[in-house]
Image (tube, helix red, strand yellow):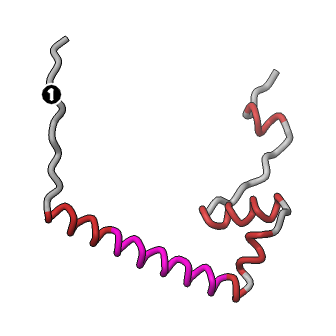
Amino acid sequence: MLRRKPTRLELKLDDIEEFESIRKDLETRKKQKEDVDVVGISDGEGAIGLSSDPKSREQMINDRIGYKPQPKPNNRSSQFGSFEF
């Protein structure tokens, strides 16, 4: 196996500016998200998320993703079709 010297990485001014702009953008998004969370808690939505009832948590997740579970029928004809024996 050939050995080579470590590659030298240079930090350029463009890289620093890009990093600073991305960091500022992330900070503003975080502040906006915190503001939305504070408004949600004052509206009472936060209390629903803090409840320990698993059904309400499951229902909240289903509502968020748009899933509407349908009850499964328990008769054999629905499971296997209309076979005649």
Instruction: Note whether 33 is above or below 56 in the view shown.
Output: below
Residue 26: say if magenta. yes
Q: How many marks?
A: 1
| Residue at 74% over, 54% down | 70
Query: Where residue 7 appears, x then y in whole percent?
Result: 16, 36
- Is residue 72 rendered to the left or right of residue 6? right
Q: Where does the N terminus fall, quadrant-wise?
A: top left
Residue at 28 percent of width and 70 percent of height: 20
Q: Is residue 18 left or right of residue 60?
A: left
Q: Main secondary structure of the magenta part?
A: helix
* Residue 34 falls left or right of residue 57: left
Tell me if residue 43 comes above or below residue 37 in the rendering. Answer: below
- Amino acid type at circle 1 is Lys
Q: Which residue is mark 1?
A: 5
Q: Nearer the viewer, residue 10 or 24?
A: 10
Q: Residue at x 85, y 41 (%)?
A: 74
For the C terminus, which image quadrant?
top right
Vertical arrangement, residue 30 with respect to residue 19, above or below: below
Question: Left or right: where does residue 61 sit relative to residue 71?
Answer: left
The residue carrying pointer 1 sits among few (fewer than 14), some (14 to 19) or many (20 or more) residues within 10 Å by Cα, namely few
Q: Is residue 6 magenta?
A: no
User: Which region of the structure is painted magenta?
Assistant: 23-40
Q: What secondary structure is marked by label 1? A: loop
What residue sits 85% from the left and 39% below the top? 75
- Residue 2 vertical placement versus 19 (above, below): above
* x then y, percent, for residue 66: 61, 63
Residue 36 horizontal/vertical position (percent): 56, 82
Q: Position of residue 45 (x, y in %)?
A: 71, 80
- Answer with the quarter of the image where residue 14 lies: bottom left
Image quadrant in which you'd find residue 3: top left
In-front residue for pair 43/32 = 32
